[in-house]
Structure formats: C-alpha cells, structure tokens
C-alpha cells in the first residue's frame, strides 16, 4: 500500500534571538514510518522537533500536517490534531502511581476510550502493568522512559515526536526503548525520533535525516545511511 504523507516541513527556520539554529530545513514523514533525526550536539535537532510540536516559534517556512499549515497554531492545538511530543528527561510525576501518570495523559478523552487506551499501553509495556500501583519515582530510568511514552500514547497521537528517548540509559535499555518504538510502528503509529545514539536510531528507522549546523546534510533510508562511509565516519565513529 502506498503511504500517505503526514508531515511536511518546508524551508523551516527557527532560532533563539540572533542565533539561528534551524537554517532552512525540508523534511517529510509518511504515515506508518519511523523517521530519525540525527546529528552532533548543537546541530539543531531539538529546535526542529520543538518547532514541529509548537513549543518553539518558527521565523520562516511552513509546517504542513495532512496538507494543512500548522506553523501558526499553538502547541495545544497541535496536540488536538494528534501531534504529541514526549519530552526529553522523562518528566514523570514521581509521587503519583504509574497508572495515575498514564491517566493524566488522556487529554480530553472519554472514560471508555481512556480505559481502552490504558489497556493498549499495558499491552505494549507489560512492566508498567505490573507496577501500575507503584509510585512512578520508584521506576528505573528505562521504565520511566516507557511511562513517558505510554503517557503520550494516552492522548492517542497520530504523530509521536520523541526527543532522545535513550538519554542516560544503559545500552540494554536503549535497545528496549527502541524495540518499543518498533512495536508502536507495527500498531500503525508514525514516529519522528531525535536521537543522539545514531547507530541504534538508524537501525530501526525507515528513513533518516542528518542535521549539520541547522541544515540537512544527508538523507536516506536508515540502511543506506548506516552504510554511507561519510555518515559512518562522522556519526557512528567507524
Ligand atoms: P543537543 O542534543 O546538544 O541539544 P541539538 O542538535 O538538539 O543538540 P539544539 O538543541 O537544537 O541542537 O541546538 C541548536 C543550536 O541552538 C545550538 O547552537 C544551541 O547552542 C542553540 N540553542 C539551543 N537552545 C537554546 C536556547 N534556549 N537559547 C539559546 N540558544 C540555544
């Protein structure tokens, strides 16, 4: 089946006062894809992701979601359209139980829909089901990251924006988180993923973009970029 284009970013610029962090970026995400955004520290990955979710203003260019421009919409209006960002650093509510954290993510959803989605999140992350009555603060780093993803799922996103999900995690947990992202794709989710861990991200991505100082330097399938000598040398340390 031919994939529908979901997100299209055109000539996008964004920054902080006189610092331009994103300098004219074009990017596309189709329905059902995992697209990774990789690049060195300070390349502009986070700024680009935040411009798409609406927490960072754009100075030029367009962002089209299912063909309609959204760059002027407030962040909450983009959430209502189905664009949901999982923030870096997890930010779970430590004293609340796992389940209460999840319920907080059920943005403007009815009771029946909330219960259904909760079941889906527990099916995706059985460890969260097992610990549903424990305070979130008692979860391990990897489990807290799963909780953050699960909480975003509760809003029933169409496009999930993931900001460095493997941040601060041991290699085994990095694999677990990225495996969960692959399971999300199998359930029809569309994911735009910012990752510092380039080789792990490219291994699961359908396509990826490499950002260099605010511009796209390389783009292609995850496989092609993993095999590209320029990418291997600069980003994979090979
Ligand atoms: P990192 O993982 O290191 O954050 P990144 O690729 O996500 O890398 P950005 O965080 O988007 O890059 O940063 C792009 C540029 O914008 C960098 O030069 C950075 O110093 C600058 N920058 C980021 N956040 C701010 C801010 N709040 N105020 C001023 N400059 C910023």
Image: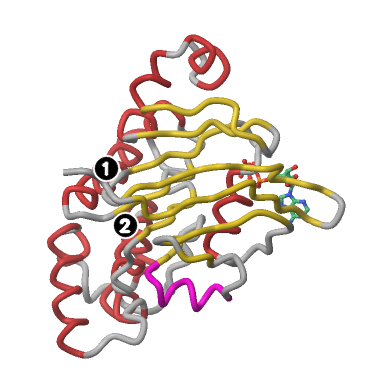
| Foreground of the two, 8 or 136 | 8
Give residue 126's position: percent from left, percent from top: 15, 59
Question: Camera-side residue: 171 or 182?
Answer: 182
On screen, residue 225 versus residue 178, left or right, reads right
Q: Quarter of the image holding residue 154?
A: bottom left
For the rendered model, the colour scheme is secondary structure
- State the residue lying farthest toward the bottom: 111
Q: Is label 2 in a helix, a strand or a loop?
A: helix
Q: Identify residue for label 1.
A: 176
How many numbered marks, from 0 up? 2
Residue at point 51% right, 18% down?
231
Tell me which segment is drawn in magenta: 74-82
Residue at which label 2 appears: 146
Main SS class of the magenta portion in the image: helix
Q: Identify which residue, 49 or 89, lies in the foreground.
A: 49
Q: Tell me whether the residue at label 2 lies in contact with that at label 1, contact meaning CB atoms closer than 8 angstroms.
A: yes
Q: Position of residue 136 (x, y in %)?
A: 35, 69
Horizontally, residue 105 falls left or right of residue 86, namely left
Q: Is residue 178 left or right of residue 186?
A: right
- Residue 219 vs 96, above or below: the answer is above
């Amino acid at each position: 089946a031919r994939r529908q284009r979901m997100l299209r970013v055109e000539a996008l610029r964004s920054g902080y006062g006189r610092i331009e962090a994103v300098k004219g970026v074009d990017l596309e995400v189709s329905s059902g894809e995992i697209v990774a955004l990789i690049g060195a520290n300070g390349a502009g990955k986070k700024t680009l992701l935040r411009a798409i979710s609406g927490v960072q203003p754009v100075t030029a260019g367009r962002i089209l979601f299912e063909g309609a421009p959204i760059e002027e919409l407030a962040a909450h209006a983009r959430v209502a359209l189905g664009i949901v960002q999982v923030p870096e650093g997890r930010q779970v509510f430590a004293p609340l139980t796992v389940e209460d954290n999840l319920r907080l993510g059920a943005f403007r959803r009815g009771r029946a829909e909330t219960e259904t989605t909760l079941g889906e999140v527990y099916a995706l992350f059985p460890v969260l089901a097992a610990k549903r009555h424990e305070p979130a603060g008692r979860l391990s780093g990897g489990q807290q990251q799963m909780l953050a993803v699960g909480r975003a799922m509760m809003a029933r996103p169409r496009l999930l924006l993931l900001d460095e999900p493997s941040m601060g995690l041991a290699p085994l947990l990095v694999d677990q988180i990225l495996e969960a992202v692959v399971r999300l794709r199998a359930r029809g989710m569309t994911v735009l993923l910012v990752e510092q861990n380039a080789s792990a991200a490219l291994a699961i991505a359908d396509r990826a973009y490499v950002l260099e100082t605010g511009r796209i330097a390389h783009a292609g399938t995850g496989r092609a970029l993993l095999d590209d000598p320029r990418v291997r040398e600069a980003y994979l340390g090979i």
